[in-house]
Amino acid sequence: MLTRMEMFTYKDNLKFDIAILAGGLGSRLNNTESRPKPLVDINGKSLLSRLIVSLEKTNLISKFHILTCNESRIFDEILGKEIQSTLYDVYSEPKRSGRIGAIKYFLTCNTKVDKFFVCNGDTLFRNLIANNILDSVKKFNSEPIIYLANDDSTREDYKKVFLDNHLKSYYQNSGLFFLTREWFCKKIIEMPNLLDIDEILFSSEIKVNYGFLDTSLLDAGTPDRLSYIRSIIN
């Protein structure tokens, strides 16, 4: 009989659900945009649709789960026009409860989802390479995988990750991670006062694994960064 790890390594056609955190208020955009931050227009197509298309190209995703709060109508309207052939659902949490609450609500709505990816809905990955993601997943041993990217020298307001066994001084948290229902539910019981999943994943008390993405990140969190994205994306 195959062990749990061998079962992951044995299969070459792995596909997973992904939950995209898209409930952010976009307060740093200074009310310059009429749409929720993940849906801001990037030269004719929303940021979220562009993110989904880039993830879809890896051929690792079976279904996209868009986690919002009281905004499902506009998400359905825009995504329905832009990614008609993509399999996705939109979840509108009745009350905003932070990123941990959003994931908890998603798992409550989907009792069959076990292993899944999570990523931020306001970040684009440039030239995402499927094997960068898959190599770590094939070695999965029940502990979460945090995907790191090369640091962005133009920014200071992001999570820096220092690894003792790597030559680089630090990496950037990409916002993409992989975990199981069992692990997540256990940790939110153990750490009930936390609202942000990063507080759990980057706790000194938590054991995690790291994957490395050979890609750059584009964050649309401020007017300047959004303008830059619009200037380089066709």
Image: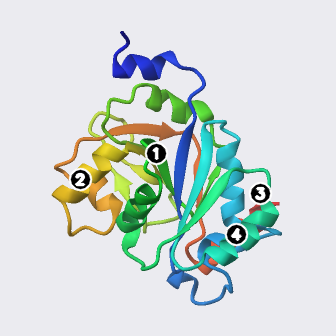
Q: Does label 1 or label 2 sit earlier along the sequence?
A: 1
Q: CB atoms at circles 2 and 4 under 8 Å apart?
A: no
Query: Badge 3 is on which residue?
Result: 83
- The amino acid marked with disc number 1 is Val
Figure check: 104 above or below 76: above
**CA–CA distance in space, label 3 to label 2:** 34 Å
Q: Does label 3 or label 2 sit earlier along the sequence?
A: 3
Front residue of 143/64: it is: 64
- The amino acid marked with disc number 2 is Lys
Judged left or right of residue 209, residue 216 is right
Say which mark, if any, is on residue 187. Answer: 2
Instruction: Determine whether the residue tagged by mark 3 lies in a helix, strand or loop.
Output: loop
- How many numbered tags mark residues here? 4
Query: Badge 1 is on which residue?
Result: 113
Q: Residue drawn 37% across and 21% down?
A: 5
**CA–CA distance in space, label 1 to label 3:** 23 Å
Figure check: 68 above or below 201: below
Instruction: Determine whether the residue tagged by mark 1 lies in a helix, strand or loop.
Output: loop
Residue 154 in picture, x, y percent from top left: 53, 63
